[in-house]
Image: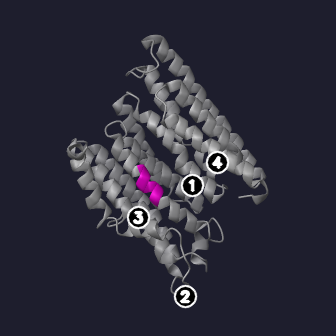
Amino acid sequence: MNNKFFPSNFLFIMLMFLGSMFSLSSSHWLTMWMGLELNLMGFLPLMNIKGKTLEAEASMKYFIIQSLSSSLLIIFSVMSYNISMSWYSMFSDNMFSNMILLSLILKLGGAPLHFWLPSITKQMPWMILFLMLTWQKLAPLMMISLTNSNLFLMLTISVISALTGSILMLNQTNTQLIMTYSSISHLGWMLSMITINNTLSLMYFINYTLISIPLISLMSTSLGNHLFILTQKNKINNLITISLILSLAGLPPLLGFMSKLIILISLIEMKMMMLSMLLFLGTLVSLYTYLNMSLMLMIKSYMTYENKKNKNIFMPLISMNILSSFIMYPLVIMIIKYAMTIL
């Protein structure tokens, strides 16, 4: 960050954090909307930390899209209120509820309303990109989990997001765009279960965040934002980065596989075979890009190997990612099965 204006940056980070907490802890839809606006006012100045022209353009695009989605949210909420005459039980299965859902999908950047997200994240600093792909999705996802909208519409959006994010990753050479489309694809997995079992979607979101924290930290230490840079001599530890990339792809026995397996098992138990197959197909398509990134890291890894004993603050997260199937997965399954008995 820009150390010269660090106090103001800290203020904006706290405003962004408190806005999301305001939405998450609220039981009234108007106050949830107010929390989203507070979060937007705190996040916009963080996008202009370095003061570059591209950052100003990206922040303006982000402001326009978020303002549009918030406007649609409050307009259709008021229309729905005129029907039900209640702010608490307003989300019934009607046209207004579906439009509210689409406004939240636009705010999240889910397909087919994802058109604004790649143009913003292309030249964004890695730390701000991490916040946009993880923290900024938390409050809208919670609001979607509370809606009583059309299940078919929600599942259609989840399938389109999973397939679109995976297909658009194929021809990308910019690592930031690859992470962006990967986030869209993972958002499809979260949306597939969010109206059925939002606990599993929250678990998937937490696992995605735990993988993204060390991965984005390691990617930010490379010399550039393009794939061929990964073949050059860089400061990142290749083997650890490859394990994190393959975990994001969902290969066993890593942490990303655990979260996808839990959702797949739940969908198959509910006889949603076609949805499971389409989500699995999206994962197979995106696996090509992840394996390509891993190959880029391995091409010169033997020639440029440096045995440096550098201290990594994310080693506990990396260890949990690698050993998840032996430690985390049985623990989570036990909690899911016996939670009602324990509580």
Circle 2 Cα neighbour tier, 10 Å, few/some/many (<14 / 14–19 / ≥20): few
Image location (x, y in percent) of residue 9: 71, 50
Q: Earlier in the sequence, mark 3 or mark 1?
A: 1
Q: Nearer the viewer, mark 4 or mark 1?
A: 4
Q: Nearer the viewer, mark 3 or mark 1?
A: 1
Q: Earlier in the sequence, mark 3 or mark 2?
A: 3
* For the residues bearing labels 3 and 2, Cβ distance under 8 angstroms: no
Examine the structure image and report whether residue 9 is included in the region drawn in magenta: no
Q: Mark 3: which amino acid?
A: Ser
The quarter of the rendered structure image containing the C terminus is top left
Report the magenta stretch's main SS: helix
- Residue 13 vertical position relative to residue 63 in the rendered view, above or below: below
Q: Mark 4: which amino acid?
A: Ile
Q: Earlier in the sequence, mark 4 or mark 3?
A: 4
Question: Mark 4: which secondary structure?
Answer: helix
**Residue beneath disc 1:** 130
**Residue beneath disc 3:** 247
Question: Mark 1: which secondary structure?
Answer: helix
- Residue 218 vertical position relative to residue 89 in the rendered view, above or below: below
**Residue occupying the point 51% across, 76% down:** 238
* For the residues bearing labels 4 and 3, Cβ distance under 8 angstroms: no
Residue 41 placement, left or right of 240: right
Q: Earlier in the sequence, mark 2 or mark 4?
A: 4
**Residue beneath disc 2:** 303
Q: Earlier in the sequence, mark 4 or mark 1?
A: 4
Quadrant of the rendered image containing residue 199: top left
Q: Nearer the viewer, mark 4 or mark 3?
A: 4
